[in-house]
Amino acid sequence: MDVLERAVHGEALSTDEIVSLYDLPLADTAAAAHEARLRRTRPDIVTYLIDRNINYTNICNVACNFCAFYRTKRQGDAYVLSYQEIGHKIEELMSLGGRRILMQGGVNPDLPFEWYLDLLRYLKAHYPEVRIDAFSPEEILGLEKITGRTLHELLIALKDAGLDGLPGAGGEILVDEVRAKAAPARIRSSDWFRILDTAQILGLYTIATMVIGFGETYEQRAQHLVTIREQQEKALRKYNNGFAAMAMWALQTEHTRLKGKAPGASAHEYLQQLAVARLALNNIPNLQASWPSMGFKVAQTALYYGANDFGSTMLEENVVSVAAGHSRTNATLRQIIRHISDAGFTSAERDPYYNILNYPDVEAVLSEKEPVALPMA
Ligand code: SF4
């Protein structure tokens, strides 16, 4: 069997074999990735999630070169949302049928640990049906430094206060050479894995992430994928609680210090990388298409390059979109369902663990007037 056939059959490719995939014609890689996706997930279904991003503070002392979102506390538009403001955003989500928030912010050294615990308790008391996936590994690392608590103690305290999961943001390329150039103070790979590993031990929800376009080599991308796959193998075997999915997107550099210094990734490169990820990650069944970084049309095409999920409504995405220099901060249900249907799949609403919740009445949704007009490519 050649390398593509072996990947389709679920064999774990070596780092060198993954690198060799980049030399193959994209049509061949895409066909194999789509075949692998059809075998590992429901072939007729593309899922989506109704949720909301909430960025509780934009004050951050990490100052990543690729970030246009963060502010220092002295800047006029620096903010910390109150519990009530966050609650109001959750009520907006609930009015649309959503029951999950993805809450992240900067690493704000002025917020004490009790602020986070009280926030989680407040949200669980007022909105018990809403699950809270929150705080990137970078924020958790910041809390470790502030509190001096062990990681285990810290995550247990957050979990007891109401935390349901940790989004695996900040994965980018988990090779320190790449990370050091893009953001010298950024969390290192070993800490990223240490934090996600402990979260998985404690039964918290996690996903894996990847961002391309820093100027990383194919070897470094392959290394990233292999280390994610190894963590997944360990987490499933030892804790029965691995990554629920892989989310991958392309670096956006508009309004950042990396503008003109990092290549980013074209649609072709993004789709190739998605296909390679599908073939390399034989133990992570769910791969998301990224409409916030690539636009709806490329995200729709991604459904034939290994993706089985159209991501989420987000309602308010501020980090990728600010760096991308556009106003794509949300997607309506109608937009998501239309793009899934037009690509020839059945839409299904899911929960964060990819359990199907329901099948929308597509005709009814598509016949509704579009509530929000977004300039999507
Ligand atoms: S990416 Fe996150 S950690 Fe880095 S500067 Fe932006 S908010 Fe801070």
Image (cartoon, grey):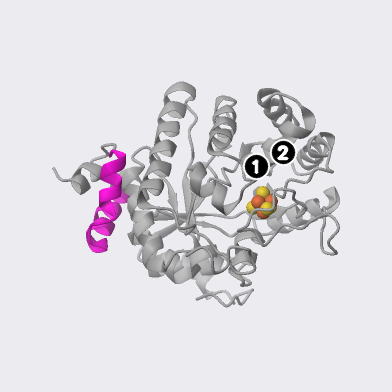
136 w.r.t. 191: above or below: below
Q: Disc 2, disc 1: CB below 8 Å? A: yes
Tell me the CA gap for discs 2 and 1: 6 Å
Residues rendered magenta in the picture: 13-38
Taking the spot 54% from the left edge, 33% from the top edge, the residue there is 190
Secondary structure, mark 1, is helix
Taking the spot 41% from the left edge, 67% from the top edge, the residue there is 267
Taking the spot 55% from the left edge, 44% from the top edge, the residue there is 352
Does residue 208 appear in this view? no
Main SS type for the magenta part? Answer: helix
Q: Position of residue 321 (x, y in %)?
A: 61, 65
Q: Where does the N terminus fall, quadrant-wise?
A: top left
Horizontal side, residue 358 vs residue 233: left or right:
right
Dot 1 beta carbon under 8 Å from ligand 1: yes
Dot label at residue 282: none
Q: Position of residue 333 (x, y in %)?
A: 56, 64
376 w.r.t. 143: above or below: below
Q: Which residue is mark 1?
A: 138
Q: Which residue is mark 2?
A: 142
Q: Position of residue 147 (x, y in %)?
A: 78, 30
Kindly identify the amino acid type of the residue bearing the numbered disc 2: Gly
Secondary structure, mark 2, is helix
